[in-house]
Image (spheres, rainbow, N blue to C red):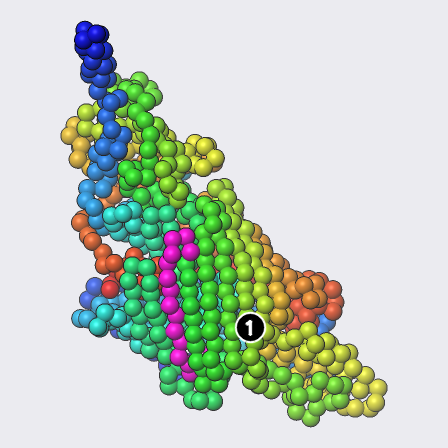
Amino acid sequence: MSTFLMRRSVLAALGACALVGMAHGAEVSGQVRAAWVDRQVADAGPLAQANQIQPGSASSEPSAGTAQAELRASAKAGPLTLHAVATAQARSPQGGTTTSDGWINEAYASGQALGWQWSAGKKVVSWDVGYGFRPNDMVQQEVRRTLASEALTGKPLLMAEHFDADTAWSLVWVNPLEAQSNTGAKEAALAARVYRRAGAVDWHGFARHGEHTGASLGVAASWVATDALELHASLRSYQHANSLASSNTGTSLSPTNPWQATRTGAGQQWLVGGTWTHESQIGVMVEAWHDDTALSDAQWNDWAARNQALPLWLTRRVPASAVAGNLAWQGHAFGASTNLRQDNVFVRLSWQHERWQPALDVLYHPADQGCVTTASLLWSGDHVKLEAGLRTHGGPDSAIVRQVPVQRQGYVVATWAF
Amino acid sequence: MNHFYKTLAALAVAAATATPALAQDINTLLKTADRYRMSAENLQVDTQVTVLNTDGSTDKERRYTVFAQSDRKSLVLMQSPVEKGQKVLMLADDFWLLMPNTQRPMRITPMQKLLGDASTGDIATMNWAGDYTGTVVGEEPCTPDNSKATCLHLSLQASRKGVTYQRIELWIGKTRHEPVRADLFVQSDKLAKQARFVMDKPTNPTTVSEMVLVDQLSNKKETRIKYLARKDRTVPAEWLNPMFLARNPSLE
């Protein structure tokens, strides 16, 4: 992006907020955030192999420092409520040049007509009951378990909602102006949710119809079983899913990237879990989930076999760049789905003590004994929040999480809210 | 025989008039005490919570807007910069939390609302009647240091699940039944906090202006919950729907 365009986007983002903020009786708030994420590149896996054969043939995200200013404004304008959130960011990757950027996280108007609440614009709409994974997050499709949480960027949508004491209906047309060719989070879709409160249980029903992925239906529930225990479950059945698949699962070299977007057949995603909290404010969360959109065990076995076979081409006088390129393309498998493996177990232990919140969580893959462990510490003041953490990948060398390009990440985030 | 019954009746009347407070209905006493904190069925209360260190310095300060409604329904909006956008909905024994980052209402357990020096329950719950049953223990000095003022000591047990404190030892004014102090016990029957109620006018109190909580479980810190403003406010029914938390009720 040119400097002119970057400046323009920063100004446009902050200008949108300022306009809303200038309205009479506006609520304005925001935060300034400075973060450093340190990433340690893997010495195993296809991308590491590619770089060993030909340095620079596969890149991974470098360590970087970012500074962000986030502005939030809400105001009443006659019968309408206006809301805008904008972020301006400067990012300085290690060994790279500093870039600045800006974007609008949310900008929407909402109002009321014929007993229904409606919203139009760019808005965050998060659904479902899970924490580590949300099968029925049909609109936002939020990436879960990110290293450090940031303000979400909403989706363009039109939404109508109806509420009574115990029931809520939501109808959403998401990405209404997107081209028909768009997939994933940019796919145009109609989505609906019905919510019903029945004493200690929250029931949710979901339906979605996407341009590409067709129909999907889901159900979820959250049940407060005792004063300390909450149990939740979510199930989604879909007609199709967007994924990536390799056209070359053998050992031969490909002239072009064999990993291409594909539309898979019908499948299911489900999650079961629970949270338990002690009066000492120690909390435990356990979740297990299955995701048919992730690559199957057979696909990963083919992938691993190909990774082992490709370097052998070097002994047959094949150019190193061709072998390194093919190995680098193998890295696309990591982006096939939000989950690397179909079956996952997630455990989180946390403790809230005055201003401090230490936490430890582990994502475990039973299929290959791979695990991702994250330790974090949060300190909250009146205006300042400090966060630090470390994420590391463990398990046997053959585990998929041991092949991803970044094996260790540490982060420090300081936030000043106003 | 007639004489025997007359004597028995006289003894009963004498016993009742000797300790009139002990004969009072506990629920009536609690309803009277509640009115000093919640002057109407439906209220909007602006609250400031200040946590003091043991040396008296300010540790932290938080601002909340509480929509306390009838039938034990409350909506709490966090107003401090570091918590801005957080909302807690309490519908009798059921609780939901919305964090601004995700914009997703989450069902939480009663134990999860016991967060911080002043739990959400301390801020949003302004009633004892209906939540607690108990007995009048007797007349005692209002403060343990044998003050001249006499209070009624009520021993209260939670009558429903989901309340912040399982047991409360409450001292209320003998004449006006205004709350004076309380010992607050959690599920495990540990003394969690000691509360003191500051009235607007010491001589003729009409309302609780401040509640002072001293933590007894861990840090011994003092938390002052100051009621900055109260006004009658009945919120629309949809505001109390958990999924409505994702909207902005303060501007709707």
Left or right: A376 in relation to A322: left
B115 w.r.t. B183: above or below = below
Q: Position of residue B234 (x, y in %)?
A: 20, 53
Principal SS element in the magenta part?
A: strand
Q: Between B110 and A218, which is closer to the camera in this rendering?
A: A218
Q: Between B4 and B157, which is closer to the camera in this rendering?
A: B4
Judged from this view, the residue extending furthest toward the right is A315
Q: Between A36 and B35, which is closer to the camera in this rendering?
A: B35
Q: Residue at x 54, y 64 (%)?
A: A271
Please give the residue where the numbered disc 1 appears in the rendered image.
Answer: A268
Q: Quadrant of the C terminus of chain A?
A: bottom left
Q: How many marks?
A: 1
- Residue A51 visible here: no
Magenta segment boundaries in residue numbering = A185-201
A332 w.r.t. A168: above or below = below
Secondary structure type for disc 1: strand
